[in-house]
Amino acid sequence: MNTSTPQGYHRVLLKLSGEVFGGTQGIGFDWQVIDHLAGQVKTIKELGIDVALVVGGGNIFRGSRAAPPGMDRVAADHMGMLGTVINAICLQDALERQHLETRVMTAIEMRAIAEPYIKRRAIRHLQKGRVIIFAAGTGNPFFTTDTAAALRASEIGADVLIKATKVDGVYDKDPVRNRDAQRYDRLTYDQVLRQNLRVMDVTAVAFCKENEIPIVVLNVEDEAGLIRAIKGEPVGTYVGS
C-alpha cells in the first residue's frame, strides 16, 4: 500500500501531457515552458524526493485521434509512442542543463538513444538519485500514457501519481466552456469511475484503485502548488480511497 507520511511523499511519479510541452498553443515546443518544467523537477529533487516522469506526445501526434480516416490504429498509436520519446529526450536535455543526472527508459527498445525499461534497473536509478523519464507508453497500442503512468507508478513503488495539466483540478464539467463548473477538492476512485470524470482514462483509474496509488491532479504552472502537493498538503484534486 502506498501512503503519504506527515512529511509528504518520498517517491513521486509525475505525468506530463504532451500538450504541456507546447505551451499555450499545445503543439510543438515552447522552450521556456520546458526549461521551467526542468526547474520544477530540480526543486523537487532538492527536497530529497525520488522523481520519475511519464510524458505524453500530444504536442507532436495524438495517436488515433490525429490519424486520417482509415489509418490503421496500431500504426497511429506507434507514431504517438515515438512522439513521447522525442519529448523525453527534449526534457532530458533540459534536466541535464539543470545539472540533474537522468535516464530515459523506453518500453520499445531503441538502445542508441535510451535504455530499455527494466523494473529493477529503474528502481536502482532512483536509489542512486537519478531522475527517470519513461517513454513510449507501455509499448502496446490501445493503451494511453495515463495507463502507462499508473503502471510505472505501481512498478517503482511510487507514493503518489501526480498528473500535471493545464487546469487546477477535476471539475464536474469543462471549466473552459462552463463558467459555473465546480472543482472537486477530493474524490474517491469509485466516484471518478461512476461519474465518468475526466481525471485519467478508466483503465488508469481502475489500476490506481487496485494498487492503492493516490492521484493528484493540479495545474503544471503552479510551481508552489506542486511542491505543496508533494509535501502532502491539499492542492488541486486528490483522488483516493
Image (cartoon, rainbow, N blue to C red):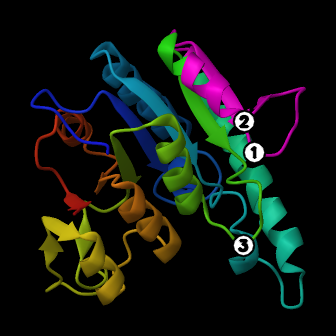
Against 129, is 206 above or below? below
The picture places residue 218, in percent across and down from the top left corner, at 28, 54
Q: Is residue 231 magenta?
A: no
Against 53, is 104 above or below? above
How far apart in space, not on screen, are marks 3 and 1 (Cα)? 14 Å
The picture places residue 105, in percent across and down from the top left corner, at 70, 33
Q: On the image, numbered disc 1 is attached to which residue?
A: 107
* Quadrant of the drawing holding the N terminus: top left
Which secondary structure, mark 3? loop
Residue drawn at the location 41% of the way across and 24% of the way down: 50
Q: Residues within 10 Å of mark 2 (few under 14, many from 20)?
A: many
Give the residue type that dot 3 points to: Phe
N-terminal of the two: label 1 or label 2? 1
N-terminal of the two: label 3 or label 2? 2
Which secondary structure, mark 2? loop
Span colored in magenta = 96-124
* Quadrant of the drawing holding the C terminus: bottom left
Q: Residues within 10 Å of mark 1 (few under 14, many from 20)?
A: many
> Can you tell which mark lies on residue 117?
2
The picture places residue 200, in percent across and down from the top left corner, at 44, 68
Tell me if label 1 and label 2 are in contact, CB under 8 Å: yes
Q: Is residue 126 visible?
A: yes
